[in-house]
C-alpha cells in the first residue's frame, strides 16, 4: 500500500488525498514506511486479518459462557474456574481466554454477592513457611432469629495453609471457651511433640487475653496481638469471617438455635477446608496444602 501511495503521489495526486483513499492519515504513512513497508501487515483498525491458528474454536467460545454460568461457577472468577476444570481433566482455555470470551457478555466484573474488594496492604508481623508455625484467631457474632441475641463463633486459622484448625460455637462470650478451643486445637495438631511451638496472633479483645495467656504459656505457644487502633492487623481471620457470612447458605435472618449455628459452622468448615480452592495457595484446598498433597496436584495441573 505505501508503494501505491508513492506511485500516485509521483503522478500528481496530492499526498493527503492518496492517504485518505487508502484509509490512513498522512502521519501514519511515515511510520509504515520506516520499517520496510508492509512487513508487519496491514495495521489499519478496519483491516481484515486472518484468524490465528491457535484461536479458540466456535465450539469453545460457546462452551465458555455456558460453563462459567453453571451454578457451581456462577460466583467464581475465571482464575478459580480454570484450575477447577483442570482438576477434572477439562481444559477449555486459560484465564485470559475466559476473560476475552466473557467480556462481551459483561461477565468480567465481580461475580459474587459481596462487594468487589478494594486494594489494601495489611501490615504483617510474622512469616509462616510451613504449617503449624503461625495461627491467627478471633471471635465473631452470628445473629439469632431473636432480636438482640447472638451466637459466638471462635475460630483458629493456620496462616500458612489457610486451613481452619479449630472452631467452636457457643451462646455466650467467655474466656473459658477460648481456652478450651486453644487446648483442643493444640492437641489435635500435635503441638506437644513439636520443638518449635506456633505463634498465635489475635486482636486485643478482652476475651482472648485473660485466662488464655496461662493456657498459652502452658502449651508453649507464643501470643501475638494486633496493634492498638489498627483494625486490619488480623486480616486473615477477618477475611475468613467475611467469606463465611457471604456464603449463599448463610441465614440472613439468623439462626434458630445454638444447634443450628453449630451445624452451619461444621458444614462451612468442611467446605472451606476440603472443597473450595483458595486463591492465596494457588487454588488448591487448605486441607491439601496443610497435608502437603498439593505438590502432586499442581504438577499434574501444570502438565495438563
Image (cartoon, helix red, strand yellow):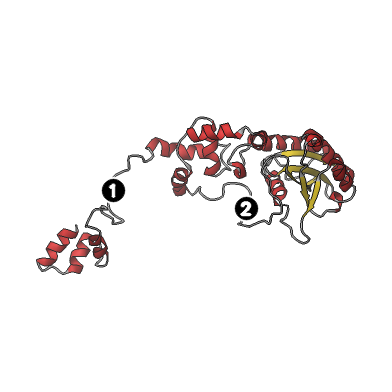
Quick one: 254 or 234, which is closer to the camera?
A: 234
Residue at (15% x, 63% y) in the render: 6
> Eyeballing the image, is 111 above or below 58?
below
- Label 1 crowd (10 A; few <14 / some 14-19 / many >=20): few
Asked where in the image residue 32 lies, by quadrant, the reply is: bottom left
Distance Cα–Cα, label 2 vs label 1? 40 Å
Q: Secondary structure at mark 2?
A: loop
The quarter of the image holding the N terminus is bottom left
Q: Where's residue 60, x and y in %?
A: 42, 36
Quadrant of the rendered image containing residue 256: top right
The location of residue 48, given as percent across then percent down, is 27, 50
The x, y position of residue 137, in whole percent, is 77, 46
Q: Residues within 10 Å of mark 2 (few under 14, many from 20)?
A: few
Q: What residue sits right under mark 1 in the picture? A: 49
Q: Position of residue 300 (x, y in %)?
A: 52, 31
Question: Considering depth in this image, is 130 or 242 the residue closer to the camera?
Answer: 130
Q: For this view, does 297 lie left or right of residue 23?
A: right
On the image, numbered disc 2 is attached to which residue?
115
Amino acid at each position: 500500500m505505501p508503494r501505491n501511495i508513492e506511485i500516485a503521489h509521483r503522478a500528481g495526486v496530492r499526498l493527503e488525498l492518496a492517504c485518505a483513499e487508502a484509509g490512513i492519515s498522512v502521519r501514519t504513512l511515515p511510520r509504515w514506511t520506516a520499517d520496510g513497508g508492509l512487513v508487519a501487515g496491514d495495521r489499519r483498525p478496519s483491516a481484515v486479518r486472518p484468524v490465528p491458528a491457535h484461536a479458540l474454536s466456535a465450539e469453545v467460545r460457546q462452551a465458555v459462557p455456558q460453563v462459567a454460568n453453571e451454578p457451581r461457577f456462577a460466583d467464581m472468577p475465571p482464575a478459580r474456574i480454570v484450575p477447577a476444570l483442570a482438576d477434572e481433566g477439562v481444559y477449555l482455555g486459560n484465564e485470559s481466554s475466559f476473560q476475552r470470551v466473557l467480556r462481551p457478555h459483561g461477565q468480567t466484573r465481580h461475580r459474587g454477592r459481596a462487594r468487589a474488594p478494594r486494594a489494601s496492604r495489611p501490615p504483617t508481623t510474622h512469616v509462616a513457611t510451613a504449617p503449624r508455625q503461625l495461627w491467627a484467631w478471633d471471635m465473631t457474632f452470628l445473629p439469632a432469629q431473636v432480636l438482640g441475641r447472638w451466637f459466638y463463633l471462635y475460630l483458629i486459622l493456620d496462616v500458612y495453609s489457610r486451613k481452619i484448625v479449630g472452631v467452636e460455637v457457643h451462646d455466650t462470650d467467655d474466656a473459658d471457651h477460648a481456652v478450651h478451643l486453644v487446648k483442643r486445637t493444640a492437641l489435635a495438631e500435635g503441638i506437644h511433640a513439636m520443638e518449635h511451638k506456633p505463634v498465635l496472633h489475635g486482636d486485643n479483645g478482652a476475651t482472648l487475653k485473660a485466662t488464655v495467656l496461662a493456657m498459652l504459656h502452658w502449651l508453649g505457644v507464643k501470643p501475638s496481638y494486633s496493634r492498638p487502633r489498627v483494625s486490619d492487623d488480623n486480616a486473615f481471620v477477618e477475611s475468613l469471617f467475611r467469606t463465611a457470612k457471604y456464603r449463599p447458605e448463610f441465614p440472613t435472618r439468623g439462626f434458630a438455635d445454638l444447634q443450628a449455628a453449630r451445624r452451619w459452622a461444621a458444614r462451612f468448615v468442611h467446605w472451606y477446608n476440603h472443597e473450595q480452592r483458595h486463591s492465596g495457595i494457588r487454588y488448591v484446598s487448605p486441607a491439601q496444602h496443610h497435608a502437603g498433597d498439593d505438590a502432586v496436584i499442581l504438577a499434574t495441573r501444570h502438565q495438563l
